[in-house]
Amino acid sequence: MKKLKVGFLFLAAVMSGSAFAQDLSGTWQQIDDKTGSQKAVIEIRKDNNGAFIGKIVKITPRPGYTPRDTCVDCPAPYKNKPILGLDVLTGLKHVEGTNNYEKGRIIDPLTGKIYDTKVRINANGKRLTLRGYMGVSALGRSQTWIRQD
C-alpha cells in the first residue's frame, strides 16, 4: 500500500509539472507560414500587468524581399515607426493551467493589419504556434516560432 501511495504521488507530481506553462519570455525566430523561411527575430518579455509583449530585434534577409524600414501602412500609433524595435505583439495573457496564451494582438508591419492572436507553446518550450485571426480563430493563419535562447 505504501508503494502505491509513493507511486501515485510521483505520478501526480510529474503530471502537475507538465500542466505548468513554459514562460514565453525570450528570443524567438519567426518562420513564415507560406514560404517556411525565417522572417524576423522577436524578443518576448512580460510587462508590469503580467501580459507578454514581443518586439522585433532583427529582420532576417530573405531572397526576393527588400525589408522596409518603417511601418508605412500601419494605423496609429505604429504609423511611420521603425520596424526594427517595434512592439508587434501585445497583451498576450497566460491561460491558467495550460501552455496556452490568449487575448493578444499582433500587427503585420508589412500590411498594417492588426490581428487577434493566441499562442500555444510546446511541452519542451522550444517551439510555439502563434495563431493570428480576425474575429474567429478558424479563419486565421498559424506560424511556428523557434526559441533562440
Image: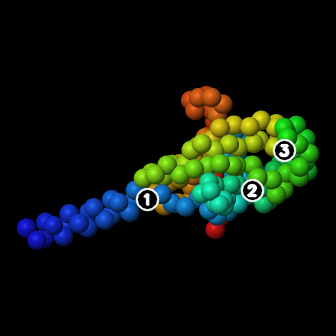
Residue at x-position 40% and y-position 59%: 18
Q: At numbered mark 2, what does the secondary structure look like: helix, strand or loop?
A: strand
Does label 1 or label 2 sit earlier along the sequence?
1
- State whether residue 99 is above or below residue 64: below
The residue carrying mark 1 is 20
Q: At numbered mark 3, what does the secondary structure look like: helix, strand or loop?
A: loop
* Crowd around label 3: few <14 · some 14–19 · many ≥20 (10 Å): few
Residue ranking furthest to the front: 49
Estimate the x, y position of residue 107 in percent, counting from the top left. 75, 42
Residue at x-position 69% and y-position 49%: 90
Whether residue 28 is visible to the viewer of this picture, yes or no, is: no
Residue type, label 3:
Pro
Whether residue 112 is visible to the viewer of this picture, yes or no, is: yes
Quarter of the C terminus within the rendering: bottom right
Q: At numbered mark 1, what does the secondary structure look like: helix, strand or loop?
A: loop
The residue carrying mark 3 is 77
Q: Nearer the viewer, mark 3 or mark 1?
A: 3
Residue at x-position 84% and y-position 45%: 78
Which picture quadrant has residue 103? Answer: top right
Q: Is residue 138 left or right of residue 41?
A: left
Badge number at residue 55: 2
Does label 3 or label 2 sit earlier along the sequence?
2
* Crowd around label 1: few <14 · some 14–19 · many ≥20 (10 Å): few
Q: Is residue 1 left or right of residue 32?
A: left
Pointers 3 and 2 in contact (C-beta within 8 Å) = no
Marks 3/1: CA distance?
A: 35 Å
Residue type, label 1:
Phe
Residue type, label 2:
Lys
Which picture quadrant has residue 46? Answer: bottom right
